[in-house]
Amino acid sequence: MKWLFAMAWLVALGSASAKDADAGIRYATPVLHWTSKDEKGVYGYIIYRSAKADGPFLRINKRIVPAIRPKSPVSGEDARLPIENRYEFKDVSADPAQTYYYSIDAVSRTGLSKQLTRPIRREPRALPSN
Amino acid sequence: MGVPAHAASSPAALEFTPGQEMPVEVYQGDRERLHFAVRNVAEHSITIDRIFPRKGGGSGSATPSTLAPGAVGKIELDFTFPDALGAGQVNFLVKTNNPDKPTELLGVGYFVQSAFSPELRLFDFGSLHTGQRARSTLEVTSRLVPELKLEKVISKPDWLDVEIKPSASGSSQTQRVVATTTSLPPVGIVNSEVVLKSNLDHERPLRIPVLLRAFDKYAVDPIPLSLGGVDEGMDKHGKLRITRYGEGDVLIDSVESGSPALRTERVSCGSGCVDLMLTFDSMKARGGLRTVLKISFKDDTQPLLVPIDALVVPIGVKSIELGDLDTLTVRGTTEMLEPNQ
């Protein structure tokens, strides 16, 4: 039952596609990026969102974002190096003109969760008009 | 994640294609309807007679039940997923009239999540004597709804009172569950469960296991006792501490080990305290030890029963002690109550 979980993570909130807001200004859809290292035993990730820093935070991904598995067993010298995986989650259910707070949990293959991030604030980002 | 799974012996005559994303992600105890397309890849017609899971509660049906060569039909499975968290697989047996392969396997990979945190939770009242009462408090959160409501108690042991209160933090997604013993259950290790109805989808219930060691005049620790791995031919020692509740000496009448491989010796450990020193002789129980030690007292009609186990490890086999396997379980905060509380 022991879940040894070593992970270095970085969450960045970027932007990808855009939507039209009421005022005619176009805002970027929130996109979460995170990087993991040595995610042995991790099944995937759950994303939570809130309009306020103190919650309530609600789960927004119906299916767990699956952890990336190595395509082939790592052996030799490479086995000692942590495998770095990069993840991206596009929050298409968000109102891009609103400020949100996000947090991410990692879920082990035994079904146990661990919070990866403190809530991170994401401001609306207007896209240049062209 | 094993979809579809086929028996290895002769080539499969049926091909299954899932109609939903796999593995299926569910919450503890969820009942789900799953859909698969089924294609007859044999050169003759096949009739599906029955579909059922190898383990657990569930059923399945095929429409149409008879498939011409190359024809595609539908399979619907109805399955109640287990409470055990994490990744797993259930195999459905598809019984057909195909003489070459009368049983096909349809494997369904799944991942069971908890709708609540902590995922592993427990009301652990420790050891209680006759006349003692205790209260245990646990905060439970769900981030599937903006406001968690635990609406009523579905089931609980008779000797436990359960109250639902707002969270101390004021979070709308957290509720405090307070369990208080009202009387003592029968002496021994008591495993029970509190089940509460929630406002989550499917009325997903909150289940909190309850653990209590109920004693009358005397208590024993630890209970149960695991001696772990013992190298073949070697002895292994253990200790049980017996304490008396209230004034007086420990008046042991007899100790029955239940196995010729287990010897006991009594050593005083102060007023109202006796240690039972145990020696397990692996030469006398080559398969291992699984027994119940019975301690009878001169002034108590209720004996103490202590399950004891040990595993004999053959020479040359490397064994690893795994230690405490439930370190991730979150226990409620337990306090002893004064008689007037």
Image: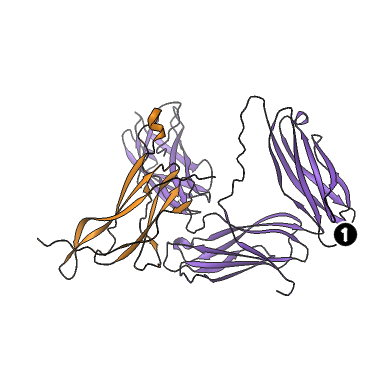
Image location of residue A54, percent across then percent down? 40, 68
Palette colour of chain B: purple
Q: In this picture, is A125 found above or below B3?
A: below
Snapshot quadrant of residue B16: top left
Name the residue tied to disc 1.
Answer: B248
For the residue pair B65 and B53, the one nearer the viewer reads as: B53
The one of A72 and A5 positioned closer to us in this rendering: A5
- The furthest residue to the left: A130
Q: In which quadrant will I find the C terminus of chain B?
A: bottom right
Q: Choose between B111 and A52: the one closer to the eye.
A: A52
User: Which residue is painted at 52% across and 57% down in the image?
Assistant: B118
Q: How many labels sit on residues?
A: 1
Front residue of A76 and B245: A76
> Mark 1 — on which chain does it sit?
B
- The image position of residue B199, as x and y in percent, is 47, 66
The x, y position of residue A63, in whole percent, is 37, 52
Q: Which amino acid does the dot numbered 1 rest on?
A: Gly
What colour denotes chain A? orange
Quadrant in which residue A93 is drawn = bottom left
